[in-house]
Image (cartoon, rainbow, N blue to C red):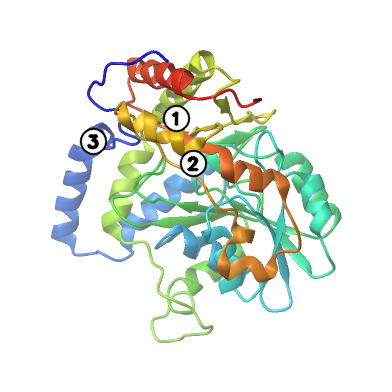
Amino acid sequence: MTTLEVRSGVPFLDLRRVTDEVAADVLAGWEALLESGAFIGGEVVAAFERELAAFCGTSSAIGMANGTDALHLALRALGIGPGDSVIVPANTFVATVEAVVLAGATPRFADVDPDTLLLTADSIASVRVRSTKAVIPVHLYGQMPDMDSISEYAHAHGLLVIEDAAQAQGATFGKRRAGAHGVAGCFSFYPGKNLGAFGDAGAVVTSDPELADRLRSLRDHGRAMGTHHDHVVVGTNSRLDAVQAIVLSAKLRHLEEWNRARGDRMALYRDLLDPGRATPVAEQTGGRGVHHLAVVRVAGRERVRRQLDDHGISTGIHYPVACHLMQPYRRYAEGALPAAERAAEEVMSLPMYPHLMADDVRRVAETLNLVADRRDR
């Protein structure tokens, strides 16, 4: 094997230049906020909600404290709870499943397409039962599944579609963006997301005005709209604060540009990687992903990651354990899910962020082609 010279490192994620692009706007917004003292709610939050709804193509956006609350409260606002079941993919961040259980419902784990690692209408059909009230398609790694076929199946069988769009701000399927296909679209703005806050934040988007009002009440201790002391349902405290709303408004103006840059980096990875050694997750026909993560499948993942680390290249794993095999959720599993389980053993995430240099992409691909074994051995 050829020995490569160790140079300065390629980080998995570097948000410094993203932050630099918005720093002036954020600081100006924070200075005005200090003068106003309106740290919770207020016009700053309302402005971001309007901007996000317009971006997604929905009539409303409801800011939340984080993406997990967005999923949990969307389920509750739709009346999903004990006695109901919700279909989720087995390969997702645990919050997708966690939200179902927190709402009092039962998750039903579905396998995924072995190439895109996304839910399909067929995989949903294979696990639907009489108690199933909803399905949560996860827009994994920044791309959406075939939302036309999923929506058609869901409509035919009376299922609500709640999008987990935590990794897919700005992705599209057909002519609609992530969040605008289902009755609700749920976002996380964790700092590393394509649209990330400077802390935790989230949102639900919807074009159902009654659902939007229920969500606004649930996030604010169950208050009736326009009141302070009239609590009409058991809610929680999941309000988006103005400090983060200022950051998100500033970043939203750059999101399309940053997503295009991510697409360019992913295209270069696909051109340079030997697919027999590092196989990128397939692209979904009919959609445009936003490449939140650059995920490949490799044999001998831990050895490969160690060797990349030796050459200064940082990587991640999303996700090493399918949710139906996690201790708290095994009781909901009803058998093997081979595509999700195999992916959990093979997936590895390469450096990906808008300001990643093309030379660094080449370095990662060159090194990976050398250290990875052929997957068909």
Report the residue marked by disc 2: 169
Q: Which residue is mark 1?
A: 259
Name the side, left or right, on which 215 lies relative to 254: right
Q: Amino acid at mark 3?
A: Arg
Label 2 element class:
loop
Residue 182 location in percent, x, y? 66, 51
Q: Secondary structure at mark 1?
A: helix
Identity of the amino acid at label 2?
Gln
Q: Residue at coordinates 40% horizontally, 74% vertically from top-left? A: 237
The x and y percentages for residue 326 are 57, 62
Tag 1: Cα neighbours inside 10 Å, few (<14), some, or many (≥20)? many
Residue at (52%, 14%) from the top-left corner? 271
Mark 3: few/some/many CA within 10 Å (<14, 14-19, 20+): few
Q: Quadrant of residue 44?
A: bottom left
Q: Are marks 2 and 3 in contact (CB under 8 Å)?
A: no
Residue in the image at 52% along x and 53% along y: 93
| Disc 2: CA contacts within 10 A as few (<14), some (14-19) or many (>=20) | many
Given residues 276 and 22, the one toward you in this image is: 276
The answer to whether the residues at label 2 and label 1 have Cβ atoms under 8 Å apart is yes
